[in-house]
């Protein structure tokens, strides 16, 4: 059950980050339109549009992975501090 919750959270994170990063898609379109008009071709729009979209997706996934790694480090630090304090308390009882 816990694994499904983690996957759902990762999915929600990646979707929200992918929708939040539109900068490269717009930049690709803004570069492609004048180049396409000058060359009288749709190839620049396809190239720059897909490249911008891919960059947006990559940036969103990278941000998700970074957030997930930070969360895992916080959990690990909390677990280590709890176990070290429990070990210190055990040593005091003897």
Image (spheres, helix red, strand yellow):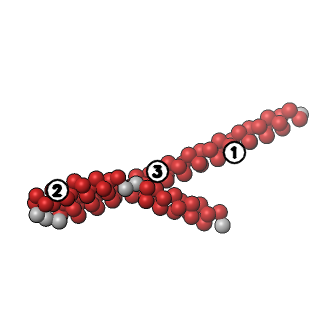
- x, y percent for residue 54: 34, 58
Q: In which quarter of the image is residue 73?
A: top right
Could you give the CA–CA distance between mark 3 and mark 1, rounded to whole angstroms?
24 Å
Q: Which labelled disc corresponds to residue 34?
A: 2
Q: What element carries label 2?
A: helix
Pointer 2 or 1: first along the chain:
2
Compared to residue 89, the image places residue 18 above or below, namely: below
Compared to residue 83, the image places residue 61 above or below, namely: below
Residue behind mark 1 = 79
Q: What element carries label 3?
A: helix
Q: Quadrant of the C terminus?
A: top right
Could you give the CA–CA distance between mark 2 and mark 1, rounded to whole angstroms?
56 Å
- x, y percent for residue 7: 56, 63
Q: In screen coordinates, is 28 left or right of 91?
A: left
Q: In screen coordinates, is 31 left or right of 90?
A: left
Q: In screen coordinates, is 43 left or right of 53?
A: left
Could you give the CA–CA distance between mark 3 and mark 2, rounded to whole angstroms?
31 Å
- x, y percent for residue 32: 21, 57
Disc 2 versus disc 1: nearer the observer: 2
């Amino acid at each position: 059950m816990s694994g499904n919750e983690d996957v759902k959270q990762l999915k929600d994170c990646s979707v929200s980050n992918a929708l939040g990063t539109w900068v490269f898609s717009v930049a690709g379109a803004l570069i492609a339109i004048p180049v396409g008009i000058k060359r009288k071709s749709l190839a620049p729009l396809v190239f720059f549009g897909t490249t911008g979209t891919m960059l947006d997706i990559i940036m969103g996934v990278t941000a998700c992975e970074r957030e997930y790694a930070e969360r895992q480090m916080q959990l690990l630090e909390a677990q280590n501090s709890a176990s070290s304090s429990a070990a210190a308390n055990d040593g005091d009882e003897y």
